[in-house]
Image (cartoon, rainbow, N blue to C red):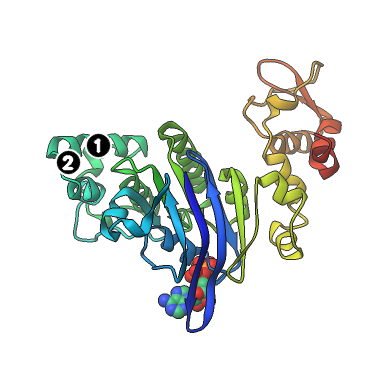
């Protein structure tokens, strides 16, 4: 668990981060969103002390980060940034093995871990282990950057726009893989993103920053249906919010007994997928694999905030 208490960073008399407090429970994902310059990166970097706070505290499992030497702290916390930050003159294997090596792991253990991570990120170890970063595509470099951040099995992972440079298809896959890996390992994750879609998809809670202040910290459905300020409402996007709300719920959760024509959608497909399928095929309902149907009426009810409020 990570507790951020009254964290503040002042640059030249101006607060880049202004008295922010929030807690991320173990194994949860917090997505930090906000406009450019709202203090997201500064907040993230104060957690691993790449930036020293002006005031406030960060506790990791109850331990004050001020009591841990910064270089030791950074070995415990995974950190992945946009543009990956790989060492250009080191092979993929050496990049991924950086922190395990600093921690004194045995060479065989490092090698096994590198191969395990490459496989996890669907990069064939035999083909990729000895390549140099410039011999990889942008998407492959980003995956290696995330693999490096996970190498020493950190309990806490900080990510600053890790998927920024990926095309939408690979990005969706990378998000899905990250969520799987994060669940498997029970990692606590704090993720900075510009993309509200990404925040809604990945975040157990969304933290919205505006001019250095935390203006809302709540589960995605609450941020969408009860934005704390006009700024949050604008950030969420009025036109997109019903679709974003639908994307939070799997079809299996609202499937009811009934008959509908056509190919079924997977149980894990979101209600947004169900709506797209209804609209595209001109149907009023779609069957769900394994039984049940989702109707347009059910979708309408789920997309409205009043339906959520009644839950
Ligand atoms: N080293 C620094 N010295 C002075 N001001 C800084 C420094 N680092 C950041 N700032 C200022 O602090 C504010 C917050 O910056 P930060 O990078 O945290 O914002 P952000 O929300 O991550 O922005 P973006 O989404 O554009 O990356 C900005 O106004 C920025 O100019």
Q: Indicate the secondary structure of the residue bearing disc 2.
A: loop
Q: Is residue 196 left or right of residue 8?
A: right
Q: Is residue 198 left or right of residue 67?
A: right
Q: Residue at image x 65%, y 45%?
A: 219
Q: Quadrant of the C terminus?
A: top right
Q: Quadrant of residue 50?
A: bottom left
Q: Indicate the secondary structure of the residue bearing disc 1.
A: helix
C-beta proximity under 8 Å, tags 2 and 1: yes
Q: Quadrant of residue 288?
A: top right
Residue 301, compared with residue 36, is above or below; it is: above
Nearest to the eye among marks 2 and 1: give it.
2
CA neighbours of label 2 inside 10 A, class few (<14), some (14 to 19), many (20+): some
Front residue of 15/100: it is: 15
Which numbered circle lies on residue 105? 2
Front residue of 100/12: it is: 12
Q: Residue at image x 22%, y 51%?
A: 98
Q: Residue at image x 42%, y 63%?
A: 46
Front residue of 125/60: it is: 60
> Residue 214: where, in percent of width, then height?
61, 62
> Residue 43: where, in percent of width, then height?
48, 63
Residue 189 appears anywhere in the view: yes
Residue 194 appears anywhere in the view: no
> Residue 10: where, in percent of width, then height?
49, 76
Residue furthest out toward the bottom: 12
> Residue 260: where, in percent of width, then height?
80, 20
Respond yes or no on whether mark 1 lies under 8 Å from ligand 1: no
Instruction: Tell me which numbered mark, 2 or 1, is placed earlier along the sequence.
Output: 2
Which numbered circle lies on residue 296? none
Q: Which residue is the site of mark 1? A: 113
């Amino acid at each position: 668990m990570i507790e951020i208490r009254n964290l503040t960073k002042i640059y030249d008399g101006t607060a880049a981060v202004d008295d922010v407090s929030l807690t991320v429970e173990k194994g949860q994902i917090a997505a930090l969103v906000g406009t450019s310059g709202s203090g997201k990166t500064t907040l993230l970097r104060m957690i691993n002390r790449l930036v020293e706070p002006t005031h406030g505290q960060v506790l990791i499992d109850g331990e004050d980060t001020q009591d841990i030497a910064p270089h030791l702290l950074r070995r415990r916390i995974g950190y992945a940034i946009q543009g990956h930050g790989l060492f250009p003159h080191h092979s993929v294997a050496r990049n991924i093995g950086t922190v395990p090596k600093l921690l004194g792991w045995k060479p065989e253990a490092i090698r096994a871990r590198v191969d395990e991570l490459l496989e996890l990120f669907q990069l064939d170890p035999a083909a990729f282990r000895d390549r140099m970063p410039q011999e990889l595509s942008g998407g492959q470099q980003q995956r290696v950057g995330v693999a490096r951040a996970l190498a020493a099995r950190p309990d806490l992972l900080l990510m600053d726009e890790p998927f920024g440079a990926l095309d939408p298809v690979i990005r969706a896959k990378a998000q899905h893989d990250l969520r799987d890996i994060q669940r498997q390992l029970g990692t606590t994750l704090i993720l900075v993103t510009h993309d509200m879609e990404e925040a809604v998809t990945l975040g157990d809670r969304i933290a919205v920053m505006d001019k250095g202040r935390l203006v809302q910290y709540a589960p995605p459905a609450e941020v969408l249906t009860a934005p704390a300020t006009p700024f949050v409402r604008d950030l969420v996007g009025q036109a997109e919010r019903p679709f974003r709300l639908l994307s939070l719920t799997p079809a299996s959760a609202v499937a009811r007994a009934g008959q509908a024509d056509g190919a079924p959608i997977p149980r894990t497909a979101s209600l947004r997928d169900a709506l797209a399928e209804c609209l595209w095929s001109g149907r009023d309902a779609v069957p769900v694999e394994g039984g049940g149907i989702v109707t347009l009426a059910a979708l309408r009810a789920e997309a409205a905030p009043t339906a959520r409020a009644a839950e």
